[in-house]
Amino acid sequence: MGHRTFAERYPVRVPPPSTAPRPVPLRGAFRPVTIRTSRDAVAAAAGYLRWLGFRDVVQPEERPASGVDLRAPGLVAQVDPSTRPTGLRAVECLWLNGLSAAAASVFFSLAGYTPEARSRAAEVGLPLFVLDLTGTPQPVNDAAEELAAGGA
């Protein structure tokens, strides 16, 4: 094989991106983790994110002050295992962490979200999920529905 010129390697005419719908990723059924402790909630969220297609999902050894429980390339996620609905401040903090890391943000909560938190998440496009005690995440807003349907 001979030497190819720059013009041969990088043609001038680049086809436009496809407008066809993105194919649904092929994946098996999600296998939830029963939630008994806060660690189980984080494990369930991590498993779900992997199932969605995020790679190298890890939990930092020490929870940072930002409250981010899970990280992956291009992703920050938080899990709220408390029995109170997640509030506006937690949603905004996660969203800002995602912005500063140039990453997608995803929130998981056991007790749901306050109306203010849901409203702000809708404004900024932050996916919200509720974890039931079987460990199965349920989408709460449109951004979460889109993520669940299309994957990472």
Image (spheres, rainbow, N blue to C red):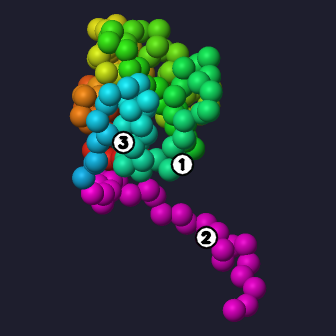
Q: Over which residues does the magenta segment extend?
A: 1-28
Question: Can the viewer see residue 139?
Answer: no
Residue 115 in view of the camera: yes
Question: In the rendered image, which quarter is residue 116 located in?
Answer: top left
> Which residue lies under the disc numbered 1?
56
Residue 10 inside the magenta-drawn segment: yes
Residue drawn at the location 24% of the way across and 28% of the way down: 132
In the rendered image, which residue does mark 3 sit on?
A: 48
Q: Nearer the viewer, residue 6 or 73?
A: 73
Indicate which disc residue 11 carries: 2
Name the residue rendered at 28%, 48% in the picture.
30
Q: Is residue 25 magenta?
A: yes
- Mark 2 surroundings: few (<14), some (14-19) or many (≥20) residues within 10 A: few
* On screen, residue 88 above or below 80: above
Image quarter (top left, top right, bottom left or bottom right) of the N terminus: bottom right
Label 2 – label 3 distance at C-alpha: 40 Å
The 10 Å Cα crowd at callout 3, few under 14, some 14 to 19, many 20 or more, is many
Task: Tell me the mark number nearer the camera, choosing from 2 and 3.
Answer: 3
- Camera-near label (2 vs 1) is 1
CB atoms of marks 3 and 1 within 8 Å: no
Residue nearest the observer in this picture, 4 or 131: 131
| Prevailing secondary structure of the magenta residues | loop
Q: Amino acid at mark 3?
A: Tyr
> Is tag 2's residue or tag 1's residue first in the polypeptide sequence?
2
What is the x, y in percent for residue 52? 37, 47
Which element is circle 2 on? Answer: loop
Q: Position of residue 6 (x, y in %)?
A: 73, 72
The residue under label 1 is which amino acid type?
Answer: Asp
In whole angstroms, how far apart are the C-alphas of marks 2 and 1?
Answer: 34 Å
Q: Which mark is residue 100?
A: none
Q: Residue 29 at x, y = what percent? A: 24, 52
